Amino acid sequence: MAPDRRVILGIDVGSTAVRATAFAVDGTGRHQAVREYPLLEPAPGWQVQEPDVLVAATLAATAACVADTAGAEVVALALSAARHGLIGLDATLTPVTPLLTGRDSRSSEAARELRASGQSRELHRLTGTPVRPMSPLCKLLWFARHEPRLCAATRWWVDLKDYLLHRLTGTMVTELSAASGTGLFDVRRREWSRTILDLAGVSESQLPSVLPTTAVLRLSAAVGRAVGLPSGTPVVVGAGSGPSGSLGAGAIDRTVGLLTLGATGAVRTVVAAPLVDPDESFCCGALTEDAWVVGGAVRNGGDVVRWAARTLAPDLAPSPGDDGETPALLDLAERVAPGSDGLVMLPYLLPDQGTDEVAGPPGALLGLRAAHSRGHLARAAVEGVCLQLGELCDRLAALTPVDDVRLAGATFRSPLWRAVMAAVLGRPARVVGATDDATLGAAALGLFAIGEAADLREAVTRLAPQCADTDPVPVDPALAATYRGLRTKLPALVSLACRTGEILAETTVGLSARARP
């Protein structure tokens, strides 16, 4: 039998790079191209990108990936992209705003007001999206208050993927996964909420129609020429990066939790229908009509140890091209006893997702003594990150049963990270790959959408048959006991750090006032 020469392209447009991966339909190989772009901060707390820069990077990565397939037939493109973004377009479909990313926090005040008014609980219940600065709802409230003329000139409000789909296919639409991350969409009725649209000051006609994530559009002739593909090549609209990452990691069983750790961290699981937590913390987003990903994220992940390397041990910091890893510093950390000899790090170098830029616990090193070395500081950083992820796992398990936890992400290449994380969880966990591969998830969803796989699990297995589960990371009982003790003290330590931060802020304000002429 002749080999199957067909490939499907999974394209994930993330916060700092687009990755295009061509997967052989028979699972015999893959080719990947990556194009990076900057995350801009024109004002404190503003995190934006130029939409057309992201489009150009997407086209460049796609063209490079197509060229690497050496003439194989591309059966479809399937998209994945970061959610919670917002772009304003005029009547000619030209951007009148940059892309306000999910990291943009200019709408913190609007989010605080909604929570203070008591409206946030009902908004979260309807939409599955917490009332936080990341939410496009809060971003729209900011625009209404600060840029009324721009709002009047805006014909469309769209997500990042909506804009990409328009540029690739000429069609202005959105899809269920993107819509369910806007804070404007009633996830149970599967429609834009008129009540929330009135609150945001926008009309339904300013928002794209909502397609299933498995809907198929067609590549335009102009884009086809640019990337080396035939006009009319199927384009599967796909889901968000988080849901796609869960699918790519194979973590789509109802009782499996996926814990990912790179620069940031996240905990997710899949449920059959939208699920909203009473604490208004977790976000719920669609993978398909009957598979919804619920979970939460932390901004302070593996980057905390990289900060420690840059700040405390520059001679051990990674060199350019080392993929941001810190093996030398982690080697020192491995020589330190669990618990870091009484040193505890609260790793909130950045305000965590779920808090405002001016609120939430500050980062802190508690129990610092002269005997502590930089190895202690590094180990305390690893332990601090794992402890906050453990708390997130516990909260998710309280919301929906999670019997098995999978670990994914480049950070878990480190034996220390794996051992500490498993011990904090208090049970074995499997490492499912170097990363939660959103491009694999996008491609698998695409394969299912075009009828080449009976279900999502078959689609993942066909494209990546070599991605079998590894043996569980064993749990050291002594290590687990140490971290159980730390976890019982963590709430009190966080409260102490918050109060200390408030006192210092009051002192700083007082000193500044006295220093004014």
Image: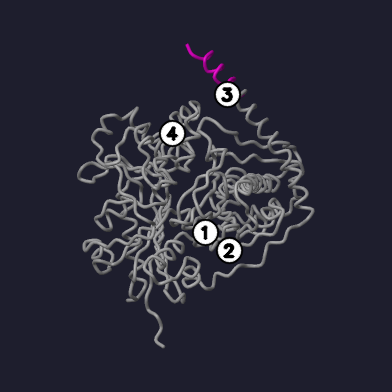
Residue 251: which numbered mark, if any? none
At which x and y percent is residue 105? 44, 36
Residue extent of the magenta highlight: 504-517
Kindly state the secondary structure of the residue where label 2 is placed. Answer: strand
Query: Helix or strand or loop: what does disc 1 sit on?
Result: loop
Task: Residue under label 1, please give it.
Answer: 436
Query: Which of the two discs, 2 and 3, labels the residue nearer the N terminus?
Result: 2
**Position of 484 compared to 265: left or right?**
right
Measured Cα–Cα span from mark 4 to mark 3: 18 Å
In the current view of this chain or complex, which residue is farthest to the top? Answer: 517
- x and y percentages locating residue 365 in the rendered image: 67, 37
How far is disc 2 from disc 4 in space, using C-alphas?
37 Å
Q: CA distance from mark 1 to mark 3?
A: 39 Å
- Amino acid type, label 1: Asp
For the residues carrying marks 1 and 3, which lies nearer the camera in this image? 1
Q: Look at 73% across and 43% down and name the residue there.
A: 486
Magenta-colored segment: predominant secondary structure? helix
